[in-house]
Amino acid sequence: MALQAIAFYLMAAITLVAGFCVVSARNPVHSVLWLILAFFSAAGLFVLLGAEFLAMLLVVVYVGAVAVLFLFVVMMLDVDFASLRQGFARYMPVGLLVAAVLAVEMILVSTTVATRGAAKASLGPMASGTLASGAGVSVTNAEAIGRVLYTDYVYFFQAAGMVLLVAMIGAIVLTLRHKPGVKRQVIMNQVLRTPATGMRMVNPRSGEGIGSGEGIGE
Amino acid sequence: MEFFNTPVGWTIWTVSHILLITVVLLLTIAFVIYGDRKIFAGVQARKGPNVVGPFGLLQSFADLGKFLIKELVIPAGADKPVFLLAPLISVTLALGGWAVMPVAPGWSVSNINVGVLYLFAVSSLGVYGIIMGGWASNSKYPFLGALRSAAQMVSYEVSIGFVIITVILLSGSLNLNQITQAQAGWFWNWNMFGGGWKNLPLILIMFPMGVIFFISGLAETNRPPFDLPEAESELVAGYAVEYGSTPYMLFYLAETSNIVLMSGLMAVLFLGGWNAPWPTPYLDHVPFAWIASLHGLVIFAIKTFFVFFMNAMVRSIVPRYRYDQLMRLGWKVFLPTSLVAVAVVAGWRVYTGFGA
């Protein structure tokens, strides 16, 4: 349909331009903002492919959470990009080499997919009808992914979850520090406080005050 | 009618649909702001806006005019494109969320299969307007407000996500229309009450989940008592310090629209959306289809405004949270509670087989 073609070319163009601006922008915060735009238009391309569930996950996870943390860190760091760019010429050959390898790989993958047909290449066992779950019948996106993810690929799925759990615990272990002598609010103690422990009746004589306030509120 | 299936006709039809929803929404927001101020004033034994128009009803329109004719001041050190983009992004996202909201039977601009996820995504993107605005202002208080809002909104999205998962488990669909239809019939079919009398024990889970969703919604929309991004006693006005005139109005509009959106989402997910609290077989016999639509629309509006009213009451009554208390509530109370709830609801669905 004409509208879909317009939408595709528009979003593809935005993705490419945004991707280019990520590397060319001088201000790192602008780079992250362009990156977010690239993510967002990539999600739009997913929608055009009919993968609306993946598109929404891309927006929720990458744009809504990961990129916010990127932005959070980049905004707080005071990175001097002029000094970072000094070695640009020296690292250029390595960068070009990596870029060339990536480009060749992507071309190989896309030509393979083009010759074998997209459905067969991307669905793997699903296309040959060997899946236990019997996916591939007309169900919604989320249901199709769920049927495959929790049956045929359940071990990979669980393993990926374990890897993420280990990463999370590792991050906590690396950054958690118990500082002694920090006063923290313990809500339980506040709730359980009674007049007997929180109050002391005094009868000060004129001109002497109540002395030190020790013993109150402990 | 053939015309509306051609690309041009489809575009005209959809755009006019969007315009209708947007205009009605903006008018609603004008009166919602008025109502919010009246409720706030009533709690404090004041009169509130009462000068412009009868009972002050036109106050919001007077404010609109005032904002529009003020001078637009951009600070010299500000990042001008980002500074101006931030309120636009805020307001676009806030209004865009309404695209999937089922306001009446079979009546939403876009009836997509992942409607809940779409709304979740849009509400999680709302943080960008605030961060960009705070950063582009190139000033200390806005920046602090932006950082606070980033941490706050990311934290509370987690518990909102888990609460939404419990609702999805009960309804068996990510489509907002189907979630609403699953709650048809008497009011005990609403998800707030467990979704059907067979699931009645789940009221012990789903009612607290509804409360958690409501409170997380307050935090997600930066509403008092969680208005730390703009805490006026600490940060002057937070991310909005450097804003005035139309950009400020857009931020304000986005915030109110988000609050109404969250109220509507609460109505759809937990209070049955456009379903009446009683079975409605009489709607099958009405002479015109639009009567049934109007019936649904009125009920949806009543529920949304009820949630908004509670929202406004919380704003007037509860004092602002301290930042560490806010984080504690989000990560140490809501996250474990909602995680356990997801496990319990999933177990209930598997082992009792009482579907929606």
Image: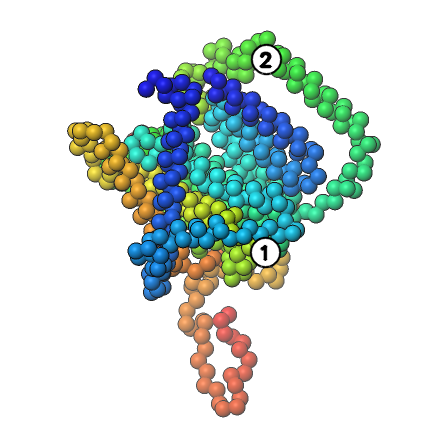
Q: How is the image coloured?
A: rainbow
Q: Which mark is residue A113?
A: 2
- In the visual, does B46 lie left or right of B226? left
Please, what secondary structure does the residue beneath circle 1 have?
helix
Q: CA distance from mark 2 to mark 1?
A: 52 Å
Direction bottom: furthest residue:
A206
Q: Tag on residue B141?
A: 1
> Where is B317 relative to A92, above or below?
below
> What residue is rendered at 48% in x and 18% in y?
A2
The residue type indicated by label 1 comes to Tyr
Determine the residue located farthest toward the top in the rendered image: A115
Q: Nearer the viewer, residue B190 or A43?
A: A43
Front residue (pair B202, B271): B271
Pointer 1 indicates a residue of which chain? B
Residue A72 is left or right of residue B180, and the answer is right
Q: Position of residue A89 (x, y in %)?
A: 82, 32
Q: Which x, y percent locates residue A80?
A: 74, 45
Q: Chain of mark 2?
A: A
Q: Amino acid at mark 2?
A: Val
Q: Secondary structure at mark 2?
A: helix
- The answer to the question of whether label 2 and label 1 lie on touching residues, with beta carbons closer than 8 A, is no
Q: Residues within 10 Å of mark 1 (few under 14, many from 20)?
A: many
Residue B17 appears at what percent x and percent y?
37, 31
When asked about the image quadrant of residue B258, the answer is top left
Q: Residue extending furthest front?
A: B69
Q: Nearer the viewer, residue B215 or B97?
A: B97
